[in-house]
Image (cartoon, grey):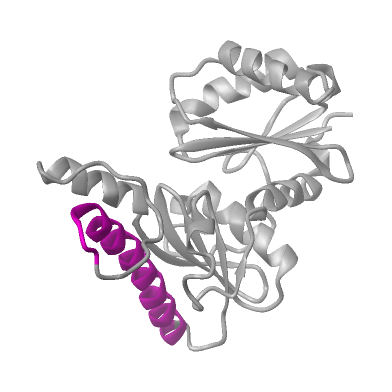
């Protein structure tokens, strides 16, 4: 079985694939200082609750945007799973062209999303990934990563609003009943929620105009579901792009998978 680890700045996803389907998925808060031993205790307990064991894992693939965590995740695979992990950006062939000025600057998560989306959707694509940052990435019809735009995530904006304005409270992000808020909390929710919808719609329109060819827009990421039904700028919502991309990377690198 394959353990796929996708680590973002806020959350880390662990998913187990048995050769036919994803049998389990768990999320943990990303903490750069978390050791391999701590990961192992947490993971072994969750596997046991699903009727699985650490010994059942015979392959591991890791995508991380937190460089200081890779050492501990690598040790988790080596010491507790007895496998050498495939690490995006280090020892794997992604099998796609990266058409930006400095390919090394492309984040692992953005590249993995591009691979996953290309496996599912035909033609040129625009991926809107809502997480710690909100990224807009163009994928060519041939699967190449062609760049995009990066904006602060909705949670970062809410946090900055609370921390910079002494009288504004910390609130939960949700779709407000009305655009015009009748109180401070409603006004903040409206500004952040509808402001982000407008950001998405505006950047999608500008990217399409700049690209000059049709783009199918895919929404994904930890909080993408917040915008479902709120905008017509996104054609499909797909929360499995990253793990699909990681699975495809494993398939493209059979020589790295241990017997």
Quadrant of the image containing the C terminus: top right
Left or right: 102 as drawn, with respect to 117? left
In the image, residue 231 lies in the stretch drawn in magenta: no
Q: Residue at x 74, y 63 (%)?
A: 119
Which x, y percent locates residue 138?
52, 70
Observer-nearest residue: 109 or 252?
109
Q: Point out the stretch of residues depicted in magenta.
A: 181-210
Q: Residue at x 44, y 27 (%)?
A: 68
Q: Residue at x 47, y 30 (%)?
A: 30
In the image, residue 191 lies in the stretch drawn in magenta: yes
| Main SS of residues in magenta | helix
Which x, y percent locates residue 38?
57, 13
Looking at this view, name the residue that lies furthest to the front.
182
Q: Residue at x 39, y 69 (%)?
A: 197
Which x, y percent locates residue 35?
52, 15
Looking at this view, name the residue that lies furthest to the left.
166
Quadrant of the image containing the N terminus: top right
In the image, residue 200 sits, relative to residue 33, either above or below, namely below
Q: Quadrant of residue 23?
A: top right
The image shows a total of numbered marks equal to: 0
């Amino acid at each position: 079985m394959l353990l796929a680890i996708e680590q973002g700045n806020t959350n880390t996803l662990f998913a187990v694939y048995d050769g036919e389907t994803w049998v389990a998925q768990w999320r943990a808060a990303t903490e750069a200082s978390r050791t391999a031993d701590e990961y192992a205790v947490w993971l072994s307990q969750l596997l046991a609750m699903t009727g699985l064991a650490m010994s059942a894992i015979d392959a591991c693939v890791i995508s991380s945007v937190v460089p200081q965590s890779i050492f501990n995740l690598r040790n988790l695979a080596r010491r507790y799973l007895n496998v050498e992990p495939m690490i995006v950006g280090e020892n794997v062939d992604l099998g796609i062209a990266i058409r930006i000025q400095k390919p090394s600057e492309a984040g692992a998560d953005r590249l993995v999303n591009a691979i996953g989306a290309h496996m599912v959707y035909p033609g040129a694509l625009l991926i809107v990934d809502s997480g710690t940052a909100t990224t807009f990435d163009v994928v060519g019809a041939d699967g190449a990563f062609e760049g995009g735009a990066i904006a602060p995530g909705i949670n970062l904006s809410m946090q900055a609003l609370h921390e910079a304005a002494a009288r504004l409270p910390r609130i939960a992000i949700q779709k407000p009943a009305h655009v015009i808020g009748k109180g401070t909390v409603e006004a903040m929710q409206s500004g952040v929620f509808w402001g982000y919808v407008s950001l998405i719609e505006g950047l999608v329109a500008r990217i399409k105009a700049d690209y000059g060819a049709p783009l199918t827009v895919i929404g994904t990421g930890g909080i993408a579901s917040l915008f479902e039904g709120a905008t017509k700028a996104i054609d499909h919502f797909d929360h499995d792009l990253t793990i699909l991309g990681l699975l495809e990377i494993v398939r493209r690198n059979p020589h790295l998978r241990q017997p």
